Amino acid sequence: MARRKSKAKPRTRSKPKLNLLDLGVSLIIANSVSTNVTGLGLRNFLFAGTQFANTSEAGRVMDMSGSNWNDNVTLKELLGGAQINPTQNRTETPGQQLMENLKTNAIPLVVTVVGIPVAVKFGKRFLQKPILTPVNKMLKMSGLGVKV
């Protein structure tokens, strides 16, 4: 008798793992963009005026120096359209200040956004065998859904 053709069983795919290295690169790039465009780090930009940031709602950095105004723009200012630093009689809108910060910090922004992923790609290639492979094996054995 001829052998019957059986349907192939569908493969069960495992859930994609969270790559910690890619997550770290994304956070570094987001912080660089935020710092170079708004004048504030990502945390201070998002949470200005709350207990999670050391920045007031109007972009004032609470430091010990005499002049604590750094031409910063917060998320609250962008959403509300508030003027930046009305105490110094400045008439720039948040959008104008963003453009000024972008023109001033264009080169560091491009270097970071292009350079960090390239450096991580080459670093990952050179460190794959000696460091990353054993770490990924340990993470897989621990049952965590992450990899490096």
Image: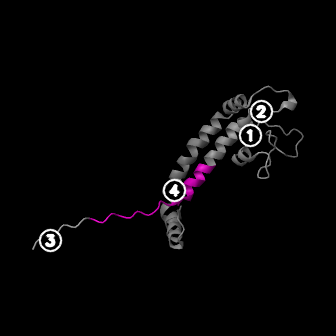
Question: From what the image shows, is residue 90 above or below residue 73?
Answer: above
Per the image, is 60 magenta?
Answer: no
Crowding at label 2, few (<14), some or many (≥20) Cα neighbours within 10 Å? some
- Element at label 1: helix
Which residue carries the number 4 mark? 124
Identity, as a three-letter code, of the amino acid under mark 4: Lys
Q: Position of residue 8 (x, y in %)?
A: 27, 65
The answer to whether mark 4 and mark 2 are in CB contact below 8 A is no
Which residue carries the number 3 mark? 3
Distance Cα–Cα, label 3 vs label 1: 71 Å
Mark 3 or mark 2: which comes first in sequence? 3
Extreme right residue here? 66
Q: Position of residue 29 (x, y in %)?
A: 61, 46
Q: Residue at x 73, y 42 (%)?
A: 40
Mark 4 or mark 1: which comes first in sequence? 1
Distance Cα–Cα, label 3 vs label 2: 77 Å
Q: What residue span does the magenta drawing correspond to?
A: 8-27
Which residue carries the number 1 mark? 76
Crowding at label 1, few (<14), some or many (≥20) Cα neighbours within 10 Å? some
Identity, as a three-letter code, of the amino acid under mark 1: Lys
Which residue carries the number 2 mark? 82
Mark 1 or mark 2: which comes first in sequence? 1
Q: Residue at x 51, y 56 (%)?
A: 124
Q: Residue at x 79, y 39 (%)?
A: 59
Relative placement, left or right, of 123 versus 72 is left
Distance Cα–Cα, label 1 vs label 2: 8 Å
Displayed quadrant of residue 23: bottom right
- Element at label 2: loop
Question: From what the image shows, is residue 44 above or below residue 81?
Answer: below
